[in-house]
Image (cartoon, grey):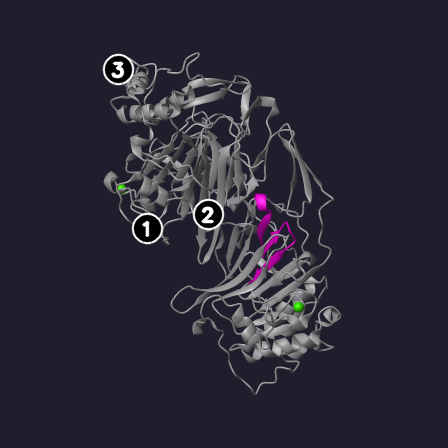
Amino acid sequence: MLVFLQVNGNFASTPFSLSNGTVQVYESGFSVVVSTDFGLVVSYDTNHYVQISLTYTYQNTTCGLCGNFNNQPQDDFRTRQGQLVSSDVVFANSWRASGDDEPGCEAQCGGLACAGCTAQQTALYSNTDHCGILSSSSGPFAACHQQLPPQSFADSCLYDLCVGGGYRPILCQALSVYASQCQQNNIRLQSWRRTGFCEIPCPANSHFESEGTGCPATCLNPNSTHNCPLPVQESCICDSGYILSGGVCVPHAECGCSFEGRYYRSGQTVILDENCGRRCSCSYGSMTCHSHERGCRPNSYETCWIRGPGSYQTFDGLTYQYPGACQLTLAKVMGLSSHPNFTVTAEKVPRNQQGFSNVLKFEAEGTQVSIEMEINGKVQVAGQVIRLPFSAGSNGIQIFYSNLRSVIIRTSFGVTVQTVWPHFVRVTAPGVYSGSLGGLCGNYNGRPHDDFRTPNGVLVNSSQDFGDSWRVGSLAAHCVESRGHDPRTDFNSSQYCGILRSPDGPFVPCWSVVDPRQQVDVCVEIMRGSNNPASTLCDVLRDYALMCQQKGVALGQWRNATGCALTCPSNSHYELCGTSCPSACPSLSFPFTCDSVCQEGCQCNSGFILNGDQCVPPTSCGCYHQGRYRESGEQFWDGEQCQSLCTCNGNTGNVHCTPNSCGPQESCRVVEGEFGCHPNPSGTCSASGDPHYFTFDRKAYDFQGTCRYVLVTLCNATDELNQFSVEAKNEALNGLPVSVTAEVFVNVWECTNSLEWKSSIYLCQWISNNCPH
Ligand SMILES: [Ca+2]
Ligand SMILES: [Ca+2]
């Protein structure tokens, strides 16, 4: 099967997953299936039939041609304006998708009136050579009659044939709709297709099976047919010795490559990374990558520092104070940029009645990372708690502890964000972003004096106005840093900030690289605001040391010289210049290439390695599996259809998987952050050729329009339910007055706090005038 498939505007081939596995796209039978973790499954046969299955948690919340999902068929004709109507034409026309402006696509008639059958046609098309075969008690569909009365299907069939003038493919389509509904009810049918009657031509190296497996073997999952949880269905199945590779049957030996979360056919060559830095070729199962020279590489970097609380140094080197707010934009790409968009924000989130957590958020290319800047703080990617180190493979974002109190986010497009508890944030961006950034880190154009620009581009004078302009939401007093006042203390003295520029102090080697006079001023500002000068001074000096180390300067033992000796947690010790990529469970070698400069901080003792933010002996480790860390002994499901159940062996660091599958009443999806087999309560809605509609509440109706329509969406946005929509475009079939579902659009919104993004999956038949080529 060849299907045209776009994800967020980019071509894609099945199977693949989006947003950390919460959206799965794969092939089953003649259909492409989009399955989400929140209980939405959209299956499209890329010809005429789309079926939507939705979990019961969405009861009474849906709108569109699929009805309101409240178990009552009689109230399904509710228009977009909320009015209950009796006319299917009025109802369906109201659900034309917004933005669809094709002229002349509105339906002109409703129900059977559109068909205009003559008595002669009715007689002919009702015989057992035509639609009558559906209700014939001696015909191939008889086994299904008791479970699924054939009358409404036979009526639809008659209707289609009248409209289509007896065109044979329409008959075959009508019969196959009933057949597939029967198979979904686990009823085994006799073979109703025969030579010369509704035969299905299969592509090269495959053959037709009326009861083919719903989980065909693919190169990625050669054993997927075992314990297949899906009902059998009509399929073109690969001949013996062949296997599915990206929708085509190939000899087993010609399987392609699974690489960074995507599947590539053998012989395929792709350019990867945002800067086109890698050219990779798949050859017989193995992917080889070489650096690709045509892309532009950053040749300079600048760094913005946020030191706490409320002290900033922009990319262009301007320093200022801003006491803060609950949510602040530190850096983001402004306007249109040919380089990847990213946003760095800092938030204060209430943690308990007294305290707040500082949360650093990073968003790029549809991936959201949030890090609680505290001991045992959670790290989340796309709303799911993850363990470090983690790589969001296809989009090249790596997240790892650089020491016990610091996390680094590194991207393939050169942006690096580091946080050190509890306040410190470092944002480093390559020179390609010069002049195109905004936020509290400034506009990055090399000129410090014009950094106070608001989101509208207005230059303001005061740091307060500037900071407020990058504040999200209202100003809540509890998020503003409280300022202590001790005017009597001279923080310029070498007892305090003066140590930074003292010729006898430990920081002299850094002077030529980070101007100490400016930093003393910053330090004094911070100290004046502090309620705990001793500990704040150590943080300020630590920040200066980190700035120096970032620029490659080697410092002496400054902590001992300043009374700032660090107490490290158990099994760890202080290092002045430790690795930024410490060994972490489960492998003694770091999972990514390490090219970061050394850093001061707590590092694990010899014989111990990082497990999350604790130092443990290697035997207490978990496993690193497909970009994710698993605890020792943890059991988890694997495969886009939960084909395996896996266990992490902490002693070896290996994951052992055995074939498995979900039970008959379960489906493979993510529930409350957990991917696996979960109970499968759902309703189904479908639109099939002509098109005929069945709502979630099993109301059947026909509708002739050829516009783009909303099949299902949420009536009202809520916090509890994931938002999504499924739209379908109908198209006249081969110039006949019959229409089919020609294109399907699946939109999935994901929300994390106030941030929101959308994945659009677009499906249509490959060989079709509908598809953009
Ligand atoms: Ca209803
Ligand atoms: Ca500037």
What's the residue type where badge 2 is placed? Gly
Which of the two marks, 3 or 1, is nearer to us in this view? 1
Tell whether position 407 is magenta. Answer: yes
Residue where numbered disc 1 is placed: 81
Residue where numbered disc 3 is placed: 137
Instruction: Name which quarter of the figure residue 298 lies in.
Output: bottom right
Above or below, 158 relative to 430: above
What's the residue type where badge 3 is placed? Ser
Please, what secondary structure does the residue beneath circle 3 have? Answer: loop
Instruction: Name which quarter of the figure residue 111 lies in.
Output: top left
Residue where numbered disc 2 is placed: 99
Which of the two marks, 2 or 3, is nearer to us in this view? 2
- Label 3: how many Cα within 10 Å (few below 14, some 14–19, many 20+): few
Please, what secondary structure does the residue beneath circle 1 have? Answer: loop
Residue 186 visible here: no
Percent x, y for residue 753? 44, 57
Residue 316 visible here: yes
Q: Main secondary structure of the magenta part?
A: strand
Percent x, y for residue 327? 49, 65
Q: Which residues are magenta?
A: 393-420
Percent x, y for residue 683? 32, 37
Residue at the image position 28 percent from the left and 49 percent from the top: 83
Q: Earlier in the sequence, mark 2 or mark 1?
A: 1
Evaluate if marks 2 and 3 touch, with contact meaning CB atoms under 8 Å apart: no
Above or below, 151 relative to 472: above
Q: CA distance from mark 2 to mark 1?
A: 17 Å
Residue at the image position 37 percent from the left and 32 percent from the top: 691
What's the residue type where badge 1 is placed? Gln
Please, what secondary structure does the residue beneath circle 2 have? Answer: loop
